[in-house]
Amino acid sequence: MESYDIVVVGARCAGASTALLLARQGRRVLLVDKASFPSDTMSTLYIHPPGVARLARWGVLDDVVASGCPPLDTISHDVDGLRLAAAVTPVDGATAAYAPRRHVLDGLLVRAAVAAGAEFRDGTRAEELVWRDGRVTGVRLRTGDSVRTVSAGLVIGADGMRSKVAELADAPVVRSAPLATCVYYTFWSGLRTGFGFHESVGRWIARIPTHDDLTVVAAYLPQDEFQAARRDPAEAYLSAVKSTAPDLYEQLMAGERADRWRGTGDQRNYFRQAHGPGWALAGDAAHHLDSITARGITNALIQAELLAGSLAGVDVADTAAVDEATARFGRDMAAALAEPYASTLELAKLRPTKARLRMLRAVAASPELTSRYFALSSGAIRMREFMTADVVDLL
Ligand SMILES: Cc1cc2nc3c(=O)[nH]c(=O)nc-3n(C[C@H](O)[C@H](O)[C@H](O)COP(=O)(O)OP(=O)(O)OC[C@H]3O[C@@H](n4cnc5c(N)ncnc54)[C@H](O)[C@@H]3O)c2cc1C
């Protein structure tokens, strides 16, 4: 039987980053994905500055920039006749956000993991966990017709919202909220918009420049409109853009749609228990939230760093130490991501409240506060850093 220190199942932003950091600790890491790489996955691609700062720390940002991905160094938010606009607040020297195509980002992360010594196999599906005395000790993998069992001190499921590892480990959902929005998006050429969003009651429109002079434009609608939207995505999408962002709509009509309609009504909101004897979860497998705040990739990078950090210096043969480290990761991850989860659930109601509009008006009157507001929504600062005494007075 082949043997590794750690097997990581799922090789996109969560799995490849985790494998990269663990391989740099000198561990024998096997990284597998059932998909063929490089390939795309459903996403509007935006990485907030805290995520970009991690890519920079790991030496991957230069490759993202070299791929021709444009820096997104400004941000705007139009709501109720109000426009908030600011430069992106730098985080640890990262002065812009980026929205790389996923075949580029995930491919670069896998390449970096392999350069750090991880072994990568795509087209390889995790089918079963191997258990001994209530502990995961390996995983059964299928590549085409060939099935093999590998043993490992830790199996990490970074295999997305419908995680097979979570299912096999029986990882309970410990916190959840109902589905809130549905979303349709596509890519457009010929737009000159920059990064930003437009909000109205029941609608959230995002515009996100990416590679090749293309812009992703996404339309978020309430979950209860999903059945109608999926019958006619073009109508649902275009009428949402037209009513909420008329200037952007004019640009779409003058531009060209460069891809098919893509959309989903299945954006769950949950935290799973992210650790157990011999196993751990990272990325969407551990925690998923509505994509309206574009947090998933940044959260995955944060989790990779927390999980690898908790395992630093731990001998994978020491089962008690491994379980202690993954339990610490579970606690730290839940604490780090609780605030963006709550604010995402609030935005995903698609109901700008009077109190929030009042707050945004006060914020818009001050360039400094506007910058801090965007820093808060990107995760660069916490609510307690935003809500200083002067802000409380003002609001
Ligand atoms: C419409 C939409 C828009 C979004 N927009 C944004 C955005 O703008 N910004 C942002 O930050 N986030 C966004 N997200 C969320 C983001 O895409 C996810 O949070 C992110 O991809 C999670 O990464 P991950 O590595 O955890 O999982 P995934 O990207 O889901 O990757 C999981 C991988 O696991 C593999 N896998 C699954 N099962 C197995 C198995 N049994 N064996 C082997 N491999 C397996 C899959 O093939 C897949 O490659 C969006 C999501 C949606 C749906």
Image (tube, rainbow, N blue to C red):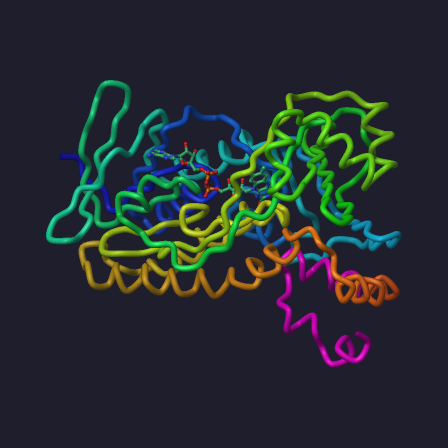
Residue 328, magenta (yes or no):
no
Q: Is residue 278 above or below residue 168?
A: below
Q: Which residues are magenta?
A: 369-395
State the residue at coordinates (78%, 36%). Answer: 241
* Front residue of this view, candidates 47 and 231: 231
* Front residue of this view, candidates 332 and 231: 231
Residue 74 shows up from this direction: no
Residue 40 appears left or right of 321: right
Figure quadrant of the N terminus:
top left
Q: Position of residue 175 (x, y in %)?
A: 44, 59
Q: Is residue 222 above or below residue 252?
A: below
State the residue at coordinates (77%, 75%). Answer: 391
In the rendered image, the residue lying farthest to the left is 133
Residue 120 appears left or right of 361: left
Q: Position of residue 272 (x, y in %)?
A: 39, 54
Residue 390, magenta (yes or no):
yes
**Main SS category, magenta section:** helix
Q: Position of residue 71 (x, y in %)?
A: 71, 41
Residue 250 shows up from this direction: yes
State the residue at coordinates (66%, 54%). Answer: 347
Figure quadrant of the C terminus:
bottom right
Quarter-wise, where is residue 275 in the image?
A: bottom left
